[in-house]
């Protein structure tokens, strides 16, 4: 057998199979420098949670009609306007493009999600210093107010995960005004939020993102234990089943040198806590509604995890309970009925977490087999 690692094989998977490939599996990549880490940690865009007033001007008329498939998506010129912390107005030429899967399709969304590409040098010394590519999540349909409630709720789910670990995507809420440069579409303003760039998130956590090849599966035993349990319990907390930590579905794979791997979740719009009208659980799952929680973590005994490993994570959720609730209670623009329903949904989770028998029956007994 050849001692060389095939070019298509991710380095970490090769290392997992070191019995076959030997020392040639060592991943050759330098860790971020202290200066790079400091720059990522101090990015001004995510240093505040004050709602950002943002204006985007582009040919949205053309984007809404033409850029509706991955192969159609292309960067288009745009102008972004905002106000810096000191009150000075800023204008910057940028590039934007459509992105996504479900929400990119015309039948599902009037207005697709966007990716903003800023030019690093021109934004030095501004709110966007250090940024590169940013995802922008906005209202999917423009005529009904409840779509904005979905945006606010998903933003808060990201903020919830931030409470538990820095190994998570930072977000910034904005009121975004969209101006169509063609003059064909009306100008409108809606809530949206910006999501931290993948590579900046990884640098901030002193590692890097690992590109994942579709169709490959990651052995779950390679993941850092405590973070993996945290992700499993968090996804259960929010009622999310639309993810996979082995196939990297709605997950980014992160490596911290020399060989620590973790998954970072994103895209929570079909979770039970948000309860979008289009959300449906996969037909293969034993639930009828996304509001029904289903534990999707692997069975502890199959991946060498002990009861005390889980209890330490449960305790972290108990300690962060008030912080989680306060995020929702203090959110500007959140509808009272949605707040009430969300707090009740969280109450149900914490009732389980406070009863060892319910933890066993409703969570661990429902674990996934390898």
Image: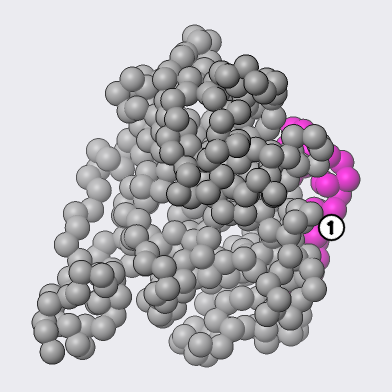
Q: In this view, does 224 lie above or below 64?
A: below
Q: Which residue is drawn at 56% across and 30% down?
A: 62
Q: Residue at x 43, y 18 (%)?
A: 92
Seen from the viewer's position, the closer of residues 113 and 315 is: 113
Task: Tell me residue 134's x, y (percent).
Answer: 46, 38
The N terminus, quarter of image: bottom left
Residue 123 visible in the picture: yes
Q: Residue at x 19, y 54 (%)?
A: 30
Q: Is residue 341 magenta?
A: yes
| Residue under numbered circle 1 | 344
Horizontal side of 278 relative to 59 (left or right) equals right
Task: Tell me residue 321's x, y (percent).
Answer: 69, 56
Q: Is residue 54 above or below residue 199?
A: above
Q: Give the range drawn in magenta.
A: 328-355
Secondary structure beneath dot 1 equals helix
Q: Is residue 335 above or below residue 28?
A: above
Q: How many discs mark residues in the rendered view? A: 1
């Amino acid at each position: 057998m050849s001692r060389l690692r095939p070019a298509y094989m991710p380095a970490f998977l090769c290392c997992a199979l070191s019995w076959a490939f030997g020392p040639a599996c060592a991943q050759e990549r330098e860790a971020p420098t202290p200066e790079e880490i400091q720059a990522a940690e101090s990015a001004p865009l995510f240093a505040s949670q004050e709602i950002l007033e943002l204006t985007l001007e582009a040919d949205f008329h053309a984007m809404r009609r033409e850029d509706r498939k991955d192969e159609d998506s292309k960067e288009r010129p745009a102008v972004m306007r905002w106000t810096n912390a000191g009150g000075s107005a800023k204008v910057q030429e940028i590039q934007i493009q459509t992105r996504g899967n479900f929400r990119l399709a015309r039948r599902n969304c009037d207005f697709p999600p966007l990716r903003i590409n800023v030019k690093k040098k021109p934004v030095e010394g501004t709110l966007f210093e250090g940024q590169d590519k940013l995802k922008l999540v906005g209202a999917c349909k423009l005529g009904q107010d409840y779509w904005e409630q979905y945006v606010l709720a998903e933003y808060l789910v990201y903020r919830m995960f931030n409470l538990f670990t820095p190994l998570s995507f930072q977000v910034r809420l904005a009121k975004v005004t969209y101006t169509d440069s063609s003059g064909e579409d009306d100008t409108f303003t809606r809530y949206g939020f910006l999501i931290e760039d993948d590579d900046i998130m990884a640098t901030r956590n002193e590692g890097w993102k690992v590109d994942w090849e579709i169709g490959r599966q990651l052995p779950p035993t390679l993941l850092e234990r405590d973070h993996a349990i945290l992700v499993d319990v968090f996804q259960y907390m929010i009622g999310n089943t639309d993810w996979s930590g082995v196939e990297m579905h709605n997950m980014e794979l992160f490596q911290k040198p020399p060989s620590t791997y973790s998954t970072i979740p994103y895209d929570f719009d079909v979770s039970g806590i948000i309860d979008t009208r289009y959300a449906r659980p996969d037909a293969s799952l034993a639930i009828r509604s996304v509001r029904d929680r289903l534990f999707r973590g692997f069975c502890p005994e199959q991946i060498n995890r002990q009861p005390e490993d889980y209890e330490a994570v449960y305790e972290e959720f108990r300690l962060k309970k008030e912080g989680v609730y306060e995020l929702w209670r203090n959110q500007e623009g959140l509808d009272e009925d949605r707040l009430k329903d969300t707090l009740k949904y969280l109450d149900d989770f914490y009732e389980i977490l406070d009863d060892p028998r319910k933890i066993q029956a409703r969570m661990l007994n429902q674990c996934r087999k390898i």
